[in-house]
Amino acid sequence: MQLKNINIILGITGGIAAYKTPDLVRKLVAKGANVRVVMTDSAKEFVSPLALQAVSGNPVSDNLLDKDAEAAMGHIELARWADMLLVAPATANFMAKLTYGLADDLLSTLCLATPAPIYIAPAMNQQMWFADATQANLKILAQRKIQFLGPAQGEQACGDVGPGRMLEPQEIADLLVPESLEQLLAGKRITITAGPTREEIDPVRYLSNHSSGKMGYALATAAQELGATVTLISGPVNLQPPALIKTVSVINAQQMHDAVMQTTDTCDIFVGCAAVADYRVQQKTEQKIKKSDSELTLTFIKNPDILSDVAHLANAPFTLGFAAETQNLREYALDKLQRKKLNMIAANDVSDSTIGFNSEQNALNVFWSKGEKKLEVADKQLLARQLMQLVAQRYIEDTND
Ligand code: PMT
């Protein structure tokens, strides 16, 4: 039981996703956690405190200035009791309050008073999620090491489609990792590549692919949570660099190769998640190619294979590669594992357009010389945590051999 004897305060704010919180409490309790629920006034419009008391087995707290509570478990005691504080759903308003350090109700006061890690599962309309103010608040909160779970993408209660749905209760429960598990990679240095590369053809055109960088960025955050010092080397993507992670931006495969090689002397683990172009044009033209002829022939030459070059170094780090395949997943992945001299490989079935490239979810089959493990379809954040824990376990076993 991943959360055995872990004390969790579940803060519920006023969003429609609050109706899922009794189920969330049950999932947390099933993992062994002790749960105390704190509700804002507007949360009580969406879900009954009585239901939450019944499923958690503890009285629900909602009042900062409660004579009885101060005599028993007042806000400071409650803040000290918690091993984790989870706010789900967290509205845009609550994120703004947290950003400014307001303490005008019990939940916001607890967020200031607790030394425990804070997890936020946002839930709001997609336009509100994209609003400049919310995005600015997100950035500040992430820099303060508040951990965001989601939001998920999809159809919303208001009829809009986009990011802003609260993750499902099971996903949230699976994403909570007690501090004691978090330091498997303390003191280790990890280099991770993410996103696509862009191979320029002329000043206005390039060859690239659909990688969004989401998987690689999620892996960088997951490695940091396990205590590693991470260098993220990223192709051109539309993502904010993760807070407190050194992020190096590159455009093409040769630049990514050079940036990676600068880290290998001191790197313990290398993860090649980027979708690196195998070829580039032999000669990038200085001027825009004009459409004068009916046909255009370009000659492509091979790019360096970053993953293989790292794994073949005399003092190679522990190396995890990816294999994005549309067929013969197992066979091609095992071939890459051997041929590129990797310690592990995560095979990605990219024939399924709902996972992998540019989607919120992924599923992986991970192989190493003496074993394999299937990681079922899940949000990329969750999958990245599962994968990094597997990498950490394999790395620790290999270095102790
Ligand atoms: O970015 P997202 O939208 O979140 O999508 C994630 C992903 C689908 C891109 C990711 O999960 C994934 O599968 N990444 C590897 C994609 C890929 O290019 O696979 P490949 O089978 O072509 O390459 C095999 C391995 O060699 C990869 O680890 C790749 O990083 C590496 N490689 C490939 C070519 C090259 N010149 N240098 C390399 O290092």
Image: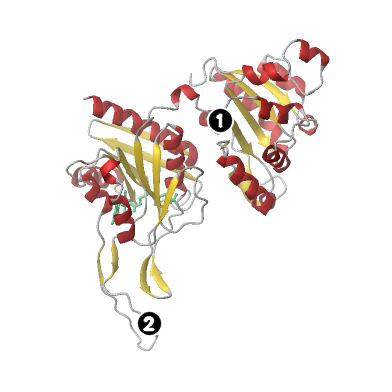
Residue 105: x percent and y percent? 77, 29
Q: Nearer the viewer, residue 19 or 75?
A: 75
User: Looking at numbered disc 2 in the image, what kind of residue is underneath it?
Assistant: Ile
In the image: residue 211, left or right of residue 396: right
Secondary structure beneath dot 1 equals helix
In the image: residue 116, left or right of residue 22: left
In the image: residue 378, left or right of residue 251: right
Disc 1 or disc 2, which is closer to the eye? 2
**Looking at the image, which residue sits at the far bottom?**
292
Q: Nearer the viewer, residue 119 or 341?
A: 119
User: Looking at numbered disc 1 in the image, what kind of residue is underneath it?
Assistant: Gln
Residue under the point 56% across and 41% down: 143
Q: Read off the residue under disc 2.
A: 289
In the image: residue 96, left or right of residue 84: right
Q: Read off the residue under disc 1.
A: 170
Distance (Cα) linking label 1 and label 2: 53 Å
